């Protein structure tokens, strides 16, 4: 019995030591339920949570008051986080598409200094993920719930060269394209001088 309580205590300690997450409120809706005496109003919140180092998740919560709805959504988002491999900690490894229902999003890798070129809910996901350079476009549904689900669907499909190399039993250098153009340029400069 004491051992079980000790394990629970350790789990709580681990959660407290976990890195602090940033959260972003994406949408808040006033929803109503019609009852015999009239209408009862509540609030639905959509929140994106991330550690800005490659982990992100989203959650939704409903309650009578806005703060309670946000709290519920944040808790759900922390439980449903995914890890996304990032190139140099700033952009995606390759171009990806994500779909959910009528929502379709296209995300493209970008050079340094591009910034986050994405709209509304997608921007929140990239900021919480820690991406600094990305070009993204939402095609289809403008519903924030579907846009976020489509974005996370695409991000979950992303593969890093390390994971591909491991799956194929090769080295990372064998998979990445050879950079032959760089040494030739330096040779031309030497000839001109």
Image: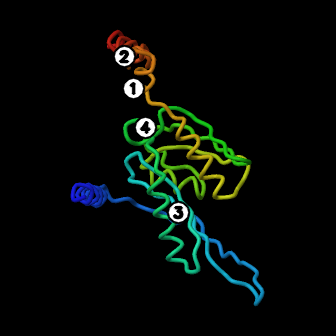
- The image shows residue 141 at horizontal and vertical percentages of 72, 52
Q: Whole-Å distance between the Cαs marked 1 and 2?
A: 8 Å
Identity of the residue furthest to the bottom in this view: 37
Please tell me which residue is depicted at 50% across the width and 38% down the height of the picture. Answer: 110
Comes first in the chain, label 3 or label 4: 3
Q: Is residue 27 left or right of residue 171?
A: right
Reading the image, the residue beneath label 4 is: 85
- Neighbor class of circle 4 (other Cα within 10 Å; few <14, some 14-19, many 20+) is many
Up-down relation of residue 9 to residue 102 (above or below): below
Up-down relation of residue 14 to residue 54 (above or below): below
* Mark number displayed over residue 47: 3
Q: Quadrant of residue 153?
A: top right
Q: Whole-Å distance between the Cαs marked 1 and 3?
A: 31 Å
SS label for mark 1? helix
* Mark number displayed over residue 1: none
Identity of the residue furthest to the front in this view: 1
- The image shows residue 117 at horizontal and vertical percentages of 55, 49
SS label for mark 4? loop
Q: Whole-Å distance between the Cαs marked 2 and 4?
A: 18 Å
SS label for mark 2? loop
SS label for mark 3? strand
Q: Could you tell me which quadrant the C terminus lies in? A: top left
Please name whichever residue, 13 or 24, is drawn nearer the observer in this view of the structure: 13
Reading the image, the residue beneath label 2 is: 171
Please name whichever residue, 64 or 92, is drawn nearer the observer in this view of the structure: 64
Please tell me which residue is depicted at 43% across the width and 54% down the height of the picture. Answer: 50
Comes first in the chain, label 1 or label 3: 3
* Mark number displayed over residue 162: 1
């Amino acid at each position: 019995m004491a051992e079980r309580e000790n394990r629970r205590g350790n789990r709580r300690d681990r959660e407290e030591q976990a890195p602090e997450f940033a959260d972003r409120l994406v949408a808040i809706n006033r929803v109503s339920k019609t009852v015999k005496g009239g209408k009862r109003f509540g609030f639905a919140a959509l929140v994106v949570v991330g550690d800005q180092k490659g982990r992100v998740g989203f959650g939704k919560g409903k309650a009578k008051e806005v703060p309670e709805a946000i709290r519920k959504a944040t808790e759900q988002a922390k439980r449903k986080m995914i890890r996304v491999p990032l190139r140099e900690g700033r952009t995606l490894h390759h171009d990806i598409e994500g779909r959910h229902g009528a929502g379709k999003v296209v995300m493209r890798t970008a050079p340094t200094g591009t910034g986050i070129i994405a709209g509304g809910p997608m921007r929140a996901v990239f900021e919480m993920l820690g991406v600094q350079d990305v070009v993204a476009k939402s095609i289809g549904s403008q519903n924030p719930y579907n846009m976020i689900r489509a974005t996370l669907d695409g991000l979950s499909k992303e593969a890093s060269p390390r994971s591909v190399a491991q799956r194929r039993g090769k080295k990372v250098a064998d998979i990445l394209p050879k950079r032959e153009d760089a040494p030739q340029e330096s040779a031309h400069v030497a000839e001109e001088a």
